[in-house]
């Protein structure tokens, strides 16, 4: 696992340059198709191998497109550790 902007994550997906950008009409078309595949995957479990591969690709590409368009702010690891320390101390005091 590597880090980007302080966020641990799996290696980044290479975004296909032809993939739609969030907020465009093409994004809406893609997202409807992705939703159809998700619904069928969850409800009926009847996707073909080709559709499973398509869904996996759409999921990866849409995640990468959103991350590129709306990057997460960097994490403050020191603050996170301090908050965790306080929560554990409070939990121990309550026991």
Image (cartoon, grey):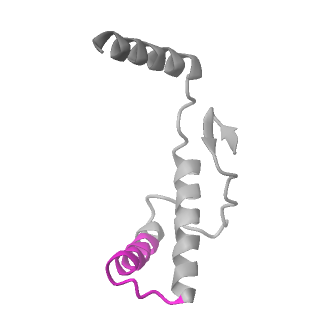
- Is 5 inside the magenta-drawn segment? no
**Which quadrant: the N terminus?**
top right
User: 29 or 39: which is nearer to us?
Assistant: 39
Quarter occupied by residue 92:
top left
Q: Main secondary structure of the magenta part?
A: helix
Q: Number of callouts in the render?
A: 0
In the rendered image, the residue lying farthest to the left is 94
Quarter occupied by residue 44:
bottom left
- Highlighted magenta segment, given as a residue range: 29-48
Q: Give the image location of residue 4, x and y in percent.
A: 66, 39
User: 16 or 36: which is nearer to us?
Assistant: 36
- Is 37 inside the magenta-drawn segment? yes
Q: Is residue 84 above or below residue 46?
A: above
Q: Is residue 84 above or below residue 4?
A: above
Q: Give the image location of residue 48, x and y in percent.
A: 50, 90
Q: Give the image location of residue 69, x and y in percent.
A: 54, 49
User: 80 or 88: which is nearer to us?
Assistant: 88
User: 5 or 93: which is nearer to us?
Assistant: 93
Q: Is residue 64 above or below residue 94?
A: below
Residue at position x 46%, y 73% from top? 30
Residue at position x 58%, y 64% from top? 61
Q: Is residue 2 above or below residue 76?
A: below
In the rendered image, the residue lying farthest to the top is 93
Q: Give the image location of residue 38, x and y in percent.
A: 40, 74
Residue at position x 35%, y 12% from top? 90
In the rendered image, the residue lying farthest to the front is 95
């Amino acid at each position: 696992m590597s880090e980007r902007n302080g966020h641990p994550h799996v290696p980044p997906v290479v975004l296909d340059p032809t993939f739609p950008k969030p907020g465009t009409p093409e994004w809406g078309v893609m997202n409807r198709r992705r939703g159809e595949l998700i619904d069928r995957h969850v409800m009926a479990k009847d996707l073909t191998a080709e559709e499973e591969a398509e869904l996996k690709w759409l999921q990866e590409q849409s995640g990468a497109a959103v991350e590129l368009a709306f990057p997460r702010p960097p994490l403050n690891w020191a603050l996170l550790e301090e908050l965790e320390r306080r929560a554990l101390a409070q939990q121990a005091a309550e026991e």
